Image (tube, rainbow, N blue to C red):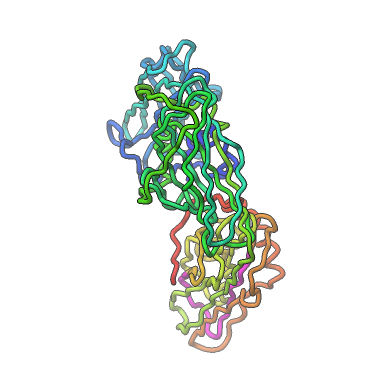
Amino acid sequence: MLTHTTRRWLAGLGVAGAFVAASATPAFAAEPTIADAKGAEGFSLYANDVIVAPGGPEKWISLYSLVDQPFTSYTVTVDRSAVEGFAEVQNLDDPGACTEAGAVLTCTVKNDEEPDLNLVSLPVLPRDGAKAGQEGQLLFTVSTPNAGTSTYRSTVTIGEGVDLTSEPVVDLAGAPGSTVLSPLSVSNQGKTDAKGAVLFFFGSYGLGPAKRYENCEYFQDNFDQYAYACSLDATVAAGGSAKLDDSFGFAVPGDAWAPNTDHGFAIWMTPADWQAFRSELPDFGKGTKGDDGVLKLSASAPSRALARALQQTDVDPANNETMIKLTVKGDQKADVEASGATLDAQVGATVPVTVGFTNNGPAAINVGGEEGIYTLALVTLPKGTTAEKAPEQCADVEGEFGPDSGKSGAAAYTCFVPGVVGKGRKAEFTFSLRVDQPGALTGTVQLFHGDPKENVGKDLNPANDTAKILVNAAGGQGGGDGGLPVTGASTGLIAGIGALLLATGVGGYLVTKRRRTRFVA
């Protein structure tokens, strides 16, 4: 999930709408992924570095404890003495949250009922008269009643301010299987030449990269269907502009849902801002470089050769984002078929039961966009059985995804796969059922399809959207139909589809953490 700091960064970049629903839990809660996250003693800490510039926005430094269980009681001291001469690290707005004694902030939390790995977040601004190149460190000290004390240092740098800008919207169109070229451009409306730039793109399924370049890093999973960053070695002169070479564009997958409208965002950053952003967002996972040559950025005016002695930061990060809107033309949808199960079992036994659905194509599903469908499976277990174990992709139909995912004991479950399911692929959900009664025990798998516009949609063949679960339990006759009435089940589930789509798919931006789901060819 995205961190507090990341959400502030994204808000500053003007893309907060795509991420505002993201969880407050840091992505590294379970397993630290930041190489320099360390404390001086018994537990690890992490705080991001920041670069601020005169005339630019405030930035936030957030301190995290990288522990299995968040601390409920702790004290954080922040020694600001090394940055006081050029940067203002402000106290929190909450009355009584932190006290000040000269350059030292002291923040104490006792018996927090909703503990968080985020221990403290502080805004940073440059002081009047601050000069580019000034740098110092904040010293964080965290003391706990039972885990001891640890320290961490975070660097505050005064950068050279530039102002990268880009056109707000680019409209594109293409059919499944086509390549749509789009050489994006960037301008510099500041008074200082921008020495180098990074283009960061993320987008939904229809906006695949047409080429994978050597100077671009492509990230897998956990952010959006596609996400990559291209480091461009060119100077964008003050008052000038630059354009990517003509090879840059997007490959619309051959199994794209059509018609559809896909969205993506292209954000221009200075190299230093990108490094700060990258270090704060371990959600990217491991990136890989491409091998299709070097993507070039060509200036529209002659560039002056300038040394990169000073780190640069964008003083207005709200105007350097381009929304890519791709209209996928054509008529290509999908037939999704429910998969039930039939098995024999003894009363008292616990048996695995695997159900789910198969995408018969031709289009992929769960691809995002405004018209592409998402598929949910309503799994009603046979009456006379008890779910001793449920998949983490399934939640009690009376509950919600997240808190109620994978809980045992429910009579019916809503199962959802957040990833793309292509033609011929199956999504499988395996339950461990205890057989409590003899007889032919029946349940159902019923599919529901929705899209962000209509909430409830249809696939190509609604007739195969229901399948039976049959457990032949030895030991006598009895049992019964475990299926819920379709009309009664669908009303609440339809509302749930709308809420789930809002959380996981509007515009194709997957902000919930993707879970590992078993796919079979």
Q: Quadrant of the C terminus?
A: bottom left
**280 lies left or right of 476:** left
Q: Is residue 461 above or below residue 504?
A: below
Residue 447 colored in magenta in the image: yes
> For the view shown, which residue lies furthest in the bottom direction?
476
Front in this rendered view, residue 8 or 162: 162
Q: Position of residue 365 (x, y in %)?
A: 56, 63
Q: Is residue 20 visible?
A: yes
Q: Is residue 73 visible?
A: no
Instruction: Report the side of 37 relative to 331 (left or right).
Output: left
Q: Position of residue 124 (x, y in %)?
A: 47, 22
The x, y position of residue 507, in whole percent, is 60, 50
Q: Where is residue 261 shown, x and y percent of the image?
A: 62, 54
436 to the left or right of 371: left
Question: Which residue is depicted at the point 53% across and 50% down?
Answer: 181
Residue 281 picture quarter: top left
Q: Quadrant of residue 260?
A: bottom right
Q: Residue furthest left?
A: 41
Relative height, residue 219 to residue 311 (above, below): below
Between 515 and 441, the residue placed more toward the observer is 515
Q: Main secondary structure of the magenta part?
A: strand
Q: Is 33 one of the magenta-colored residues?
A: no
Q: Residue at x 51, y 79 (%)?
A: 341
Q: Residue at x 53, y 80 (%)?
A: 437
What residue is rendered at 55% in x and 22% in y? 95
Q: Which residues are magenta?
A: 430-449
Count of marks placed on residues: 0
